[in-house]
Structure formats: C-alpha cells, structure tokens
C-alpha cells in the first residue's frame, strides 16, 4: 500500500482558505519559533542567545511586518508569475525589516515561506514546484552581491538554503514535519515536541549561519548536540540543565543556527495549515 506523505492535503487546504488565514499561518509559524524556549544561540524568552543585535522585542517587530509581505505575494496572478516581481516583493520586505528593526531579522524565512506560499498556490506537485520556482528565483538573484551564505557555500562546499529549496525542502517535509507530528502523537506537549523538532533539524539542516559563525567544526557540534538533545527528550532526561549549558557554550563561541530557526518556523506554519483539514 502506498502511503501518502503528511503534506499531501496542503494544496487542497490552501485552495479553500481565505487569504487572511494563509498569511496568519506563516506569521504564526515565525511567532511560535520565537517563543519556543530555550533555544541555544537563538533569541527566545530567556535571552538573546549569540545575537548582540537582536532581542525579543526586535524579533516581534520583525514578525509583525510579515503579513504585508504575504499579502503582496498573494496579489501576484498565478497565470503570470514574474520572477522579477517576486524578487522585488522580497527585497521590499527585507528593506522594511532593516528600516524598522535595524538589522537582518527574518531574511531566510522571508525567502523560504515566500517560495512555499507561491508553490502552494501553483500546483499539486508541491515539492517539484518548490524546486522549479526556486531555480528560477535563484537565477534572478545570481547577479546580486555575495552574501555570507554564498561565501560559506564556496568555502565549505555546503548547499544551505539553495540546496534545501532545489531539493523541494527535504528538511521540512522529510524530517521536521514528520518529527514534530510524531512527538505530538506520542503525547509530548507543545514545548517538548518543539524542542524535539529543533533537535532533529539540528542534525540535518545545512545551516550557513552555523558555517559562518563556527566553520565546519561548529556545524558538526550543532549536529552532535541535536543527537544528544533528542536522546535526552526520548529518555525524559534533564533537558533544561543541558540546554542552559549548551546555550552558554554557543554564546561563548558566538555560534548560532538561524537556518534551523527558519525551518522550525516553517514546520510550525505547515502544521498550522494542516490543522485546517479537519474543518474542510
């Protein structure tokens, strides 16, 4: 018997949802990620992690700007998707965040959530559409200035967000979403299931922010820490103490994992959309 993937109902669900609910799902995903606590090296309810230029208030302000971005994307006609127009919408969103927050806040999430939102509206072959749309957008972006992510891809031969998108977001659909839903089905509460999600993504996401801050050794450390954290959760161990110690190490090493945070937010967004299935 062929098992349908967890995300199979997504496009059908999104065909019936009002625009407000679509934008709310992706905005809520980012807000849930921010509030998930504790997250080593990342902004949460306890501290700023390894980010001197960010805090909870700034991140909340950034999330409040997301709906306008999604509304602009949803105004693009499906029968004439212009990659230049999509890119311009994304750049405007980045500029708004820089103006209102003073720093790069949700840049990676803007791209990931925008690609997924447009793919959900275009076709039922979701992951192939994500890959095809991403390829077009990356071609438009290729002439822009070199970013930290691009420098990491060249230096460490990692794929980062480009590889993730060109492969149809495997970290989301093959790891993050099944993991989170599995832990919830097993009776874990919202926080512990979210931390298990983080742990799993720490093991699989090719995070260029980790490479930028900590090099290949930093990435390997994050992957080992993800394995340790998931074992502790499964064994009902003392994760609070371990996470506090991990956060202290990451702060001392200036290590963070912004790409993993983006995938946590995206997983939450997709889970929120799938929750709508019961009402259809």
Image (cartoon, rainbow, N blue to C red):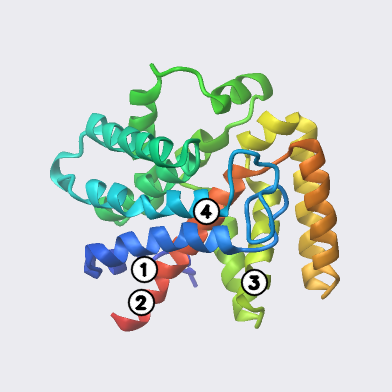
- Position of residue 262 measured from the top left corner of the image (x, y, whole percent): 53, 49
- Secondary structure of the residue carrying tag 2 is helix
Of marks 2 and 4, which one's residue comes earlier in the chain?
4
Q: Which residue is mark 4?
A: 57
| Mark 4 crowd level (few <14, some 14–19, many ≥20, 10 Å Cα) | few
Q: Which residue is mark 2?
A: 277
Cα distance in 3D space between marks 3 and 2: 23 Å
The C terminus lies in which quarter of the figure?
A: bottom left
Q: Which residue is mark 1?
A: 9
Q: Nearer the viewer, residue 213 or 123?
A: 213
- Secondary structure of the residue carrying tag 4 is helix
- Secondary structure of the residue carrying tag 3 is helix
Q: Nearer the viewer, residue 222 or 134?
A: 222
* Residue 65 against residue 139 in the figure, above or below: below
* Residue 139 against residue 169 in the figure, above or below: above
Task: Identify the residue shown where x is 40% and y is 65%.
Answer: 8
Cα distance in 3D space between marks 4 and 1: 35 Å
Which numbered disc, 3 or 4, marks the residue closer to the eye? 4
Of marks 2 and 1, which one's residue comes earlier in the chain?
1
Of marks 1 and 3, which one's residue comes earlier in the chain?
1
Q: Are marks 2 and 4 in contact (CB under 8 Å)?
A: no
Q: Which residue is mark 3?
A: 191
Q: Are marks 2 and 1 in contact (CB under 8 Å)?
A: yes
């Amino acid at each position: 018997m062929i098992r349908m993937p967890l995300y199979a109902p997504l496009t059908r669900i999104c065909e019936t949802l009002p625009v407000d609910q679509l934008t709310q799902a992706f905005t809520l995903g980012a807000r849930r990620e921010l509030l998930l606590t504790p997250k080593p090296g990342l902004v949460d309810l306890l501290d700023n992690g390894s980010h001197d230029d960010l805090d909870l208030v700034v991140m909340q302000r950034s999330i409040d700007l997301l709906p306008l971005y999604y509304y602009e994307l949803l105004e693009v006609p499906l029968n004439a998707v212009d990659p230049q127009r999509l890119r311009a919408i994304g750049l405007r969103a980045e500029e708004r965040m820089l103006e209102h927050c003073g720093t790069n806040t949700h840049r990676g999430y803007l791209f990931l959530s925008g690609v997924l939102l447009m793919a959900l509206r275009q076709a039922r072959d979701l992951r192939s559409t994500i890959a095809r749309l991403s390829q077009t957008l990356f071609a438009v972006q290729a002439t822009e200035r070199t970013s930290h992510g691009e420098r990491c891809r060249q230096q460490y031969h990692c794929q980062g967000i480009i590889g993730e998108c060109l492969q149809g977001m495997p970290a989301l659909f093959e790891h993050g979403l099944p993991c989170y839903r599995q832990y919830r089905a097993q009776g874990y509460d919202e926080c512990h299931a979210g931390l298990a999600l983080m742990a799993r993504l720490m093991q699989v996401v090719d995070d260029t922010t980790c490479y930028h801050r900590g090099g290949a050794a930093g990435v390997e450390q994050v992957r080992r820490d993800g394995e340790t954290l998931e074992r502790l959760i499964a064994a009902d161990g003392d994760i609070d103490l371990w996470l506090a110690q991990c956060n202290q190490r990451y702060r001392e090493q200036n290590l963070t994992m912004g790409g993993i945070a983006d995938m946590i937010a995206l997983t939450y967004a997709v889970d929120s959309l799938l929750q709508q299935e019961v009402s259809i």
